[in-house]
Image (cartoon, grey):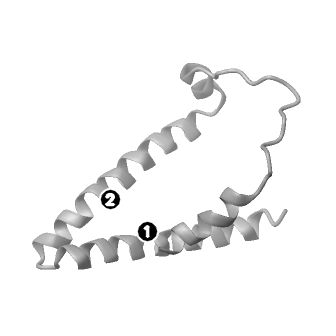
Amino acid sequence: MLLVAAIVPLSLSHMHSPELSEPTEHMPLRRMFKLAPLGVVAAFVSGIFIGSFYALAPLYASLTGLSSDDVSWKGHGDGQAYQHPGIHLNEIADPA
């Protein structure tokens, strides 16, 4: 319900996205890997870990005896709890 309430002011605003000064082009994965191999590998591995966690955590919670409502509320709360420290650290590292 709060998400819907948060979307209402955004949908009523008349702001447009900024125009790009130069056209952007698609970067092939091979070129991206040549420029930043650690970044590509880290993004791939973290995607696998996070995907498997969010796929298997509700299954584990339901097998331990939690109801469907408890599993959904716990998953939502955990998602918020895991994002908050990252957001806070990002604000400290790049305050602009």
Q: Are marks 2 and 1 in contact (CB under 8 Å)?
A: yes
Quarter holding the C terminus is bottom right
Neighbour tally class for label 2: few under 14, some 14-19, many 20 plus, Cα within 10 Å = few
Q: Is residue 62 left or right of residue 13?
A: left
Identified by mark 1, the residue type is Gly
- Could you say which quadrant of the image residue 25 lies in? top right
Q: Residue furthest right?
A: 21
Which of 76/45 is in front?
A: 76
Estimate how packed mark 1 is, as few (under 14), some (14 to 19) or many (20 or more) residues with alpha carbons within 10 Å: few
Q: How many marks?
A: 2
Kindly identify the residue that appears in the image at 31 percent across and 59 percent down: 53
| Residue for badge 2 | 54
Q: Of label 2 and label 1, which has the lower sequence position? A: 2
Residue 35 drawn above or below residue 78: above
Q: Toward which corner of the image does residue 7 lie, by quadrant?
A: bottom right
**SS type, badge 2:** helix
Q: Position of residue 69 (x, y in %)?
A: 24, 76
92 up-or-down from 40: above or below: below
Residue 41 is situated, as x and y percent measured from the top left of the image, at 49, 38
Residue at the location (18% across, 63% down)?
59
Q: Residue at x 75, y 24 (%)?
A: 24
Question: Which x, y percent locates residue 26?
Answer: 64, 21
Three-letter amino acid code of the residue under disc 2: Tyr
Q: Residue 66 got which mark? A: none
From the viewer's perspective, is 8 left or right of 77? right
Residue position for label 1:
79
Residue at 41% across / 76% down in the picture?
Answer: 77
Q: Secondary structure at mark 1?
A: helix
Question: In this view of the protein, which residue sits in the foreground, 38 or 61?
Answer: 61
